[in-house]
Amino acid sequence: MSSKIEEAQEHIRQAEKCLKTSLLKWRPDYDNAAEEYNKAATCFRNAKSLDQCRDCLMKSSDCHRQNRALFHAAKCLDQAILICKEMNNLGEIRKLAERSCNLYQQHGSPESGATVLDKAAKILEQTHPEDALQLYKQAVDVVTIEDSTRQGAEYASKVARIMVKLGMYDQAADAIRREIGLHQQVGSEGAIGRLAVALVLVQLARGDYVAAEKAFKEWGNCCDAAEVQTLESLLQAYDDEDPELAQRALSSPFIRHMDVEYARLARDLPLPKGMAIAPKANVIENAAASYVSPNSGAAGDAAAKPAAAPAGEDEDEGGLC
């Protein structure tokens, strides 16, 4: 290991020598310096000194950029991404991928730029989904500028699925519509049918039944028979507030075998609560006097008959007279 470190340090000294200028050497030799830094990076990697390996790759990239060798500069940053992955230093990957993509685009290789964005996003997807989302968005923009519609639809699908995973349902609905538009350009009706199911699920997750029904009416003609039947049952269940019918529709085989994010969304989708039944009122006995009709004869006699005065009061009145 020590011999590799010493060899790497010698390459660094040679690179620094190439970058020096003098009276007879007005311009640094960026080409040879980049090569020496690249050799040093290889030695450091073999010696498992990954920090120094990454630093040498960055310096090599900068030398290539100064020499207007933009493709090689981007390639060095691409290699630095893999070193950061080995180091488990994921915080730098997004920035490196964006810089590498920019250099590839300047060189005229946008497909390579989109590829490095995709590779970096896959590394970050599980632990840093927000960074992966931004990288996939940039990849969509890069390939659609170059009219690579199929590749753009693939990246757009990843954007939508990450948004669903993060609970960003409003943005996910827009992303799915964009993905549908890309598939329309290439005439892929089968993919549009599956996306129609995903869009209905996302709209129901947003709590917007009207938007879910509208999505089905707009794209349902691209669904196959099983998908149409399931979506009709699902929307009918939410319209009738029937949780059992909704559960049966969400448990259909093709929904369970959708992409993982959509299958989980269907599993966790809030079911309609059903029609609420008013609780039966409790009757309290003898809470009030019974009602007696005024037309009743007995009641009339009782009302007409005056109450008898006490005997003592009658005798007192007679005595006064």
Image (cartoon, grey):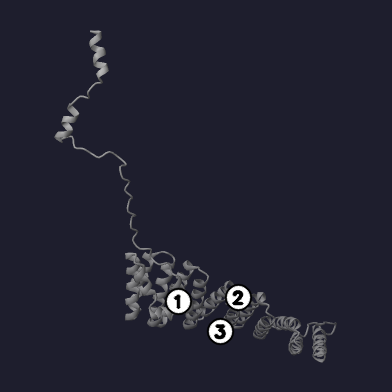
Q: Disc number at residue 251?
A: none
- Would you call the spot at circle 1 few (<14 residues within 10 Å), some (14-19), or many (20 or more)? some
Marks 3/2: CA–CA distance: 26 Å
Please state the total of marks drawn on the protein image: 3
* Residue 250 figure quarter: bottom left
Q: Position of residue 185 (x, y in %)?
A: 41, 80
Instruction: Label 1, secondary structure: give it.
Output: helix
Q: Disc number at residue 263?
A: 1
Would you name the residue on which mark 3 appears? 111
**Residue 184 shows in this picture:** no
Residue sticking out furthest to the top: 321
- Would you call the spot at circle 2 few (<14 residues within 10 Å), some (14-19), or many (20 or more)? few
Q: Is residue 259 above or below residue 276?
A: below
Marks 3/1: CA–CA distance: 31 Å
- Ranked by sequence position, the earlier of labels 1 and 2 is 2
Marks 1/2: CA–CA distance: 21 Å
- Would you call the spot at circle 3 few (<14 residues within 10 Å), some (14-19), or many (20 or more)? some
Q: Position of residue 181 (x, y in %)?
A: 42, 76
Instruction: Label 3, secondary structure: give it.
Output: helix
Would you name the residue on which mark 2 appears? 127
- Please state which of residues 247 and 18 is positioned toward the viewer in this rendering: 247
- Ranked by sequence position, the earlier of labels 3 and 2 is 3
Question: Type of residue at label 3?
Answer: Glu
Describe residue 163's horizontal placement relative to residue 282 as left or right. right
- Please state which of residues 230 and 284 is positioned toward the viewer in this rendering: 284
